[in-house]
Amino acid sequence: MKQRIIQRITRLFAIVTCTCTLAFSPAFADMPEPTGVPLAKDLQSDAQLARKKGGVVLVLFENEHCGYCRRVLNEFLIPMSRNPEYQAKLVMRKVDNAGYASLKDFNGTRAAHTDFSRRHHVRMVPTVMLFDTQGNRLTSPLVGLSTADYYGYYLDQAIDEALEKSKNAGS
């Protein structure tokens, strides 16, 4: 009986050790977040990817404690990120409006997420902005989530407008 308990504890310890080793290994460091909308790290590379697609970069400015931000992610952006039609024309990233993680801006400059948010005059979250491949904002930002019933429509309108402006500018 004692031997069986020791075997189970040993197995459990092995499982926990392997799980921790995998979770903190460098191989997992660059994996996309399970949300479907990764945290912005290199917007310059993201812009290059958008250029290859003939698309634009969508940035969600959010805060981890913002319930409306979670709704925008869960009800709109995550489903869009899984849709091949949107994958073909958008590169989606999120910026933590209150975070100090570093990112590379569209022009290659390093900045904290908070500084990038401030530079784009983001005062309220959630805010969605659409950028061309040069980092120019293409549409008016979608600020807040006042009308959830129409938010998807407004988001699609903004995306279509951004794509049209980007196509006409040839960026």
Image (spheres, grey):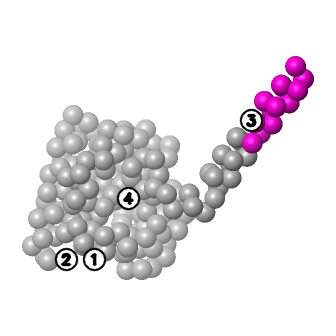
- Mark 3 vs 4, N-terminal side: 3
Image quarter of residue 40: bottom left
Query: What amino acid type is highlighted by mark number 3?
Result: Leu
Left or right side of 2 for 34: left
**Residue at disc 2, secondary structure:** loop
Can residue 143 be seen here? The reply is: no
State the CA–CA distance, disc 1 to disc 2: 7 Å
Report which residue position mark 1 lands on.
Answer: 134
Q: Which mark is residue 93?
A: 4
Q: Which mark is residue 145?
A: none
Magenta-tinted stretch: 1-14
- Mark 2 vs 3, N-terminal side: 3
Q: Which mark is residue 171?
A: 2
**Residue at disc 4, secondary structure:** strand
Residue pictured at 37% horizontal, 75% vertical: 44
- Mark 2 vs 4, N-terminal side: 4
